[in-house]
Image (cartoon, grey):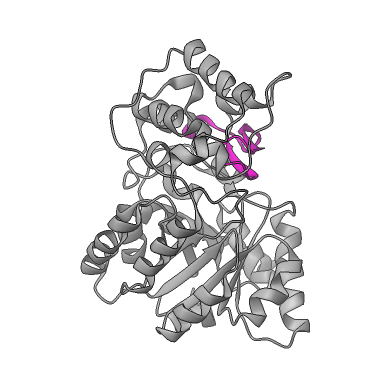
Amino acid sequence: MNLRTPLCERLGIEHPIFGFSHSAEVTVALAESGGYPVFGAAREAPERIAGELAAIRGRLGKRPFGVDLMYPKLAGDEPDRAAARAKLPPEHIAFVERLKRKYAVPAPTKPNFFADRVRNRAFFRAQTEAVLASEVDAVVTAVGLPREVIAEAKARGKTTFAMVGSVRHVAAALEAGIDVLVAQGYDAGGHTGPVGTFTLVPEVLDAVQQAGAEVPVLAAGGVGSGRQIAAALAMGAQGVWLGTAWLATREYGTPPVLLRKLLAARSEDTVISRAHSGKPCRVLRSRWSDEWSAPGAPEPLPMPYQHALTGELLAAIEEHQVEPLVYEAAGQSVAWFNELTTVRAVVARLLAETELALARLRAA
């Protein structure tokens, strides 16, 4: 069965499966499996992005891939982490120190984005310049919609995608000239909005139609089975966007402690928390999210201050795999990924399940 949609034809890919990952290995494997990979560069130092994207391009040849960048509204714009830390409330600093002692977290010994960087406008601009100057085929804007970035990307011949978590974001995206909309529902891992995927996708499709636009829409948020892909296609989406799926693949190289948690997790084992970045973010539940939501805990600080506060501790937790506190951004689709697998196997399963679901629908 041919599952190619018009967007597949337009982008030159075999399957309507779009995959977000922070892993270059996953990016390459998904492209080789016929999907459209999107490399998440939001956690990457600007000076490293050019080399990383050039390496991916060298391995992919002419196969297309995109890069995802964040453009959030910030509560402050300090030039470095030290300046941001100078504004942290004493009670928040004391709370983090208590967590460090309670869980006996050793000090970090390796460089880490969360410990070494602060998100500010200069940082986002440097990331953007590195991506625009690269040979990537597409730029994805998430947690924000900077029109100047979209215009620059289009001027350089790159396809532009925008993540939208509410139907009210559609008009601004269309006015900015976005080429593809990704309707990301509440079910999704990472920074996400308040509306469920099954509601949001048709709302976004209706808004595009009412605007008289011909902009394809992808369904994102909690997608982990072919039945959901069939449903997305039935609603009118031209593909699906997955992120959590790749955490359980060999290519991602998930550390053992985190991998065990992910493979054992059910959909209800993910929670929305501001303790990760200061913005609502769906993560795998852990003592980290529990501690920040416990009675008497301080409210997480807005971005970028939450990372300035917790960055060093998060780096240590990740480096030393402190089991109770280990977590990762993950969506409710985590329930479908309960064994270590490969990117190619995930794509093959999703395609087979989609074909079966569509065949059953025709038979009914």
Horizontal and vertical percent position of residue 276? 56, 37
Give the quarter of the figure containing the C terminus.
bottom right
Q: Which quadrant of the view contains residue 15?
A: bottom left
Is residue 269 on the magenta stretch?
Answer: yes
Q: Residue at x 73, y 53 (%)?
A: 196
Horizontal and vertical percent position of residue 114? 43, 39
Q: Height in image: 27 above or below 320?
A: below
Q: Residue at x 45, y 59 (%)?
A: 122
Q: Which quadrant of the view contains residue 359?
A: bottom right
Whether residue 232 is visible here, answered yes or no, is yes
Whether residue 355 is visible here, answered yes or no, is no
Q: Height in image: 216 above or below 29?
A: below
Asked whether 150 or 6 is in front, the reply is: 150
Horizontal and vertical percent position of residue 55? 22, 62
Q: Height in image: 344 above or below 266?
A: below
Asked whether 99 or 287 is in front, the reply is: 99
Is residue 38 on the magenta stretch?
Answer: no
User: What's drawn in magenta, residue-wise?
Assistant: 262-283
Q: Height in image: 155 above or below 168?
A: below
Q: Residue at x 40, y 56 (%)?
A: 41
